[in-house]
Amino acid sequence: MAAFSHRWDLSPKEAFALQRKLAAQVERRPRLGPVRRVAGIDVSVRNDTARAAVVVLDFEGLAPVDYATATRPVTFPYVPGLLAFREGPVVLDALERLDAPPDLLIFDGQGLAHPRRLGIASHIGLLVDLPAIGCAKSRLCGRHEEPAQEPGSHTPLLDQGEIVGAALRTRRGVKPVYVSIGHRVDLATSVEYVLACCRGYRLPETTRWAHRVAGGDVPPIHSQQPTLFDS
């Protein structure tokens, strides 16, 4: 599925430099067709092994239609801001195993809301050339005013004078999520799709399904198993 690739066995210094180079290639304007299938992506790491899950949902009803998992040993050190170098290769493995290709990717991670404007949503979205959105549970950079309690309320996330994302309230009484452009979308579109994927919980259904599968609630195989989709 990858449109292009690069080496992953880089030093942190080399990885920082590559992020700056790739960030210039991220498309910040919408370039997406009809969204019929949306995928949630999450990675869990246990005992130095990364397990990626990609769960594809029918966008209209948010019902799962396909999923894939992959595992790899973790070979890149934990360095803040370099999450894609730890998790990117195994995410690409899982994406390659899908039977039902998604029209939009929603990552449990950052897009442009990143010190070098290339979080994992932007990085992988660029590599596979698919529209992608970052929807993170916590803030990596920037500052924002607290959004109103009404679901759908959001405020700009600002970093060094640039709007890099939005703090979005998806449910009354819970902390906001941090939405940012991944690739081939703009911020308004990103907020719109995240809200459309929420069903009364803080996190969108894409993230909830991907987190469940990445955590091992289903067997680590590529399949359309009733045990996943009928639960």
Image (spheres, grey):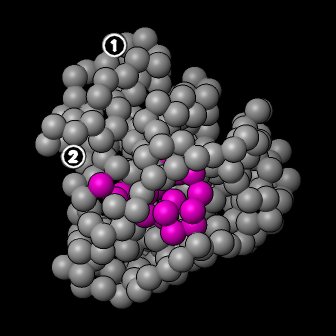
Q: Quadrant of residue 58?
A: top right
Mark seen at residue 141: 2
Mark seen at residue 125: none
Position of the N terminus by quadrant: bottom right
| 113 relative to 153 in the view: left or right | left
137 falls in the magenta region: no
How far, Cα to Cα, is label 1 from label 2?
A: 21 Å
> Considering only vertical position in the picture, is 158 above or below 122?
above
- Nearest the eye: 137 or 158: 158
Q: Which residue is mark 1?
A: 148
Tell me residue 64's x, y (percent): 76, 46
| 228 relative to 7 in the view: left or right | right
Question: What residue lies at 76% left-to-right and 32% top-to-bottom?
Answer: 60
Tell me residue 175's x, y (percent): 35, 28
Residue that protrudes farthest toward the left in the picture: 160
Question: What residue lies at 76% left-to-right and 52% top-to-bottom?
Answer: 228
Question: What residue lies at 48% left-to-right and 43% top-to-bottom?
Answer: 29
Secondary structure under tag 1 reads loop
Tell me the crowding category of disc 2: few under 14, some 14 to 19, or many 20 or more residues within 10 angstroms, Cα based: some
- Nearest the eye: 86 or 16: 16
Residue 18 appears in the rendering: yes
Task: Say what amino acid the circle numbered 2 marks.
Answer: Cys
Marked residue nearer the N-terminal end (1 or 2): 2
Tell me the crowding category of disc 1: few under 14, some 14 to 19, or many 20 or more residues within 10 angstroms, Cα based: some
118 falls in the magenta region: yes
Secondary structure under tag 2 reads loop
Residue 12 appears in the rendering: no
Highlighted magenta segment, given as a residue range:
117-134
- Nearest the eye: 101 or 65: 101
Question: What residue lies at 58% left-to-right and 72% top-to-bottom?
Answer: 3
